[in-house]
Amino acid sequence: MIPGVDGFMYPNEVELQWSVLIVLYPFITGLVAGAFILASLERVFQVQAVRPTYRLALLTALAFLLVAPLPLQLHLGHPERSLEMYLTPHRSSAMAMFGFVYLWYLTVVLLVEIWLEYRADIVRMAQSTRGFARIIYKALTLGSENVSPAARAIDDKVGYIVTVIGIPSAFMLHGYVGFIFGSIKANPWWSTPLMPVVFLFSAMVSGIAAVMLLYMAAMKVKGRLIDMPCVDTIATYLFYTFVIDFTLEMLDLIHRTYEADESFRSLDFMVHTRLWTSQVVLQIVLGTLLPLALLAANQLWRFAAERRRAMYTAAGCLTLIGIFAMRWNVVIGGQLFSKSFLGYTSYKMELVTREGLVPAIALMLLPFAIFFVLIKLLPPWQESEAHKA
């Protein structure tokens, strides 16, 4: 009897091929897509209330995007071979196309929009700083030091176009992850047309929640007053996006239950045993219903600013836990049962191996270190000096 295995398992199913690193990958890319969508609310849809978080959202997206490929790189036995996707492109492979989507989104969309938004500030800092900082800012100007009103008008127009292009690009960046899972017909846990859509909306939920938490934390650290109309607006968008995401997930669940094909009994058993804590407790109860209740309460009643901040903080943290649990249940849960539906295995996370807990924690902390460097290099606060309590 193999420890952790019940019933009949094929030999290639006993050990899981995708570990916690593959859980981190869609979680991190989801934060990128969601943060960019929040930034687009101000630039494209003219939601002026969220203006204080515009630059912060862009820097958040960049910090997490720089780390997004690293879980995949650690998972690969020969990470240097990932360059082959650029040298010998395989256009029919959804996984290979990620390299081009990632490169497009990083270089053409995100970096260009950040540079256009910060260009005047970069020129100013290149002229006012000294030493090594001056060299950095001088290089970041890319030789363009014209900050006249006419030049800035062109920056705004081009930035608007880039943001419009970036919205479907953000959808492609994360939607293709759900597409890959949803197109695996041999796995009934993954094979559903709703998988890409659920991944997209859960990405928007996690990104919006992350930016809201980072904004409130940054204002607290900087000793500035939090713009509550801004946070209230973000929380409203978070609530309605979350409702859509939860509705889609419940629609998928109801469809599976009603269809009740030959795999249903196996999946139902797994939910009530191996995935009970991660799916029912963490994802549904703590990570979905409770934050939805906190956000809904603020839509129905008007609480004091301090209480609203506490409720938004709790809702944001629980939301991120719930979305991570959802990624865990999809990636890990989809590998815990045999394709014969006659056996089940378990996943034991190791500690300090290449795909263990310590590297996973390091990868989750790395974007925050990059974010700290980015806000030091390109401060996003100057437009929010005076905030309302």
Image (cartoon, rainbow, N blue to C red):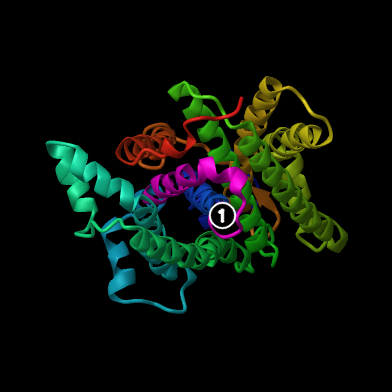
Question: Is label 1 in a helix, a strand or a loop?
Answer: helix
Quadrant of the snapshot with the C terminus? top right
Image position, residue 84 (x, y; %): 29, 69
Task: Quadrant for residue 156, please give it.
Answer: bottom left
Image position, residue 206 (x, y; %): 59, 44
Q: Is 167 on the left or on the right of 197, as rendered?
A: left
Outermost residue toward the left in this view: 131
Q: Residue at (65%, 54%) from the top-left corner?
A: 201
Q: Nearer the viewer, residue 53 or 89?
A: 53
Q: Is 156 on the left or on the right of 287, as rendered?
A: left
Image position, residue 388 (x, y; %): 60, 28
Q: Nearer the viewer, residue 232 or 97?
A: 232
Image position, residue 202 (x, y; %): 64, 50
Task: Quadrant for residue 196, please give it.
Answer: bottom right
Q: Is residue 302 above or below residue 33?
A: above
Q: Is residue 177 above or below residue 364?
A: below
Q: Main secondary structure of the magenta part?
A: helix
Q: Residue at (46%, 42%) from the top-left corner?
A: 56
Q: How many marks?
A: 1
Residue linked to disc 1: 37
Q: Is residue 362 above or below residue 78?
A: above
Give the crowd class for mark 1: few <14, some 14-19, many >=20 residues within 10 Å: many
Badge 1 amino acid: Ile
Residue 100 is inside the magenta segment: no
In the rendered structure, which segment of residues is drawn in magenta?
42-66
